[in-house]
Image (cartoon, grey):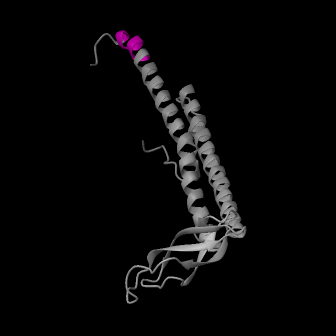
Amino acid sequence: MAGVPAVRGPRALLWRWWPNPLRRRSDKVEAWTLLATWAVTLLAGVLAGAATAQSVERSLARERAEWRAVPARLIERAPGSAAGSERVWAKVRWTAADGVAHEGQTRVEPGSAAGTPVTVWTDLEGLQVTRPATKAQASLRASLVGMLIGVSAAAVPLAGGRLLRGRLEQLRLDAWDAEWERVDPQWGWKTG
C-alpha cells in the first residue's frame, strides 16, 4: 500500500470516529463503549479517591482535636534492664477527666521503676488510644487510602467495560460466521 499514508499523532487515537465505508455499526458501538468506559473509570476513580481522602483527613483531624495526652504512672517495674535500647510494654494507671481511674499498657524505657511518670493518650471517655497522627502523617495516610480506594473504584467500570467489549467482539465474530455461511456456498468451492 504505497499510496496510503500512515496515520500518526492525535488522529490515530480517533480512528474509530473517522468516516469509513468499511466501518460497521458494531465498530461505532465499540468506540462509544470504549469512550464511556474510560470516562466513567476516570470519574469513579477520582471522585471515590477524593471523597475517601477527605473523609480520612477529617477523621484524623477530629482525633487530633479530641484525644488528649494524660499523665500516667507505672504500676510495676518495667521488664528488662536500663541498658536495653528497645522500649518495652508495662502496666500504667491514669485518672480520666471525670475522675475514674483506668489501667492499660504503654511502651516505656526498660527497667523503669514503679511510679515513674509517663504519658498516655486518651479519648473523650478516658479510654486509652494511640497517639493521634500529626498533620503530615494524616495527609500522607489520607492520600494513600484515597489512592487505594480510587484505583479500586476505577477497576469496577473498567472491568465492566472490558466484559462488554468482549461480548461485542463475540457478537461481531458470530455475525461474521453467519455472513460467511451465507456467502461461502456462492463461490462453488470450499475454503476450509
In the displayed structure, 17 sits above or below 137; it is above
Is 44 situated above or below 65?
above
Please say whether residue 24 is visible from this viewpoint.
Answer: no
Q: Is residue 32 left or right of residue 86?
A: right
Q: Give the image location of residue 28, x and y in percent.
A: 58, 31
Q: In which quadrant will I find the N terminus?
A: top left
Please state the horizontal and vertical placement of residue 77, each as a whole percent of the image.
Answer: 45, 81
Rendered residue at 46%/32% (across/down): 166
How far across and down, in percent of the image, does residue 132 sit? 62, 70
Q: Is residue 14 magenta?
A: no
Quadrant of the drawing holding the C terminus: top left
Q: 60 or 170, which is in the foreground?
A: 60
- Quarter of the image where one finds residue 178: top left
In-front residue for pair 128/103: 103
Q: Residue at x 31, y 10 (%)?
A: 188
Q: Nearer the viewer, residue 29 or 81?
A: 81
Q: Is residue 121 above or below residue 40?
A: below
Q: Give 117 or 184, whichever is nearer the viewer.
A: 117
Total number of numbered discs in the rendering: 0
The quarter of the picture where residue 25 lies is top right
What residue range appears in magenta?
179-186
* Residue 180 painted magenta: yes
Q: Main secondary structure of the magenta part?
A: helix
Q: Is residue 5 visible?
A: yes
**Residue depicted at 63% across the width and 46% down the height:** 44
Find residue 110 and report its horizontal and vertical position in percent: 42, 83
| View extreme (bottom): residue | 83
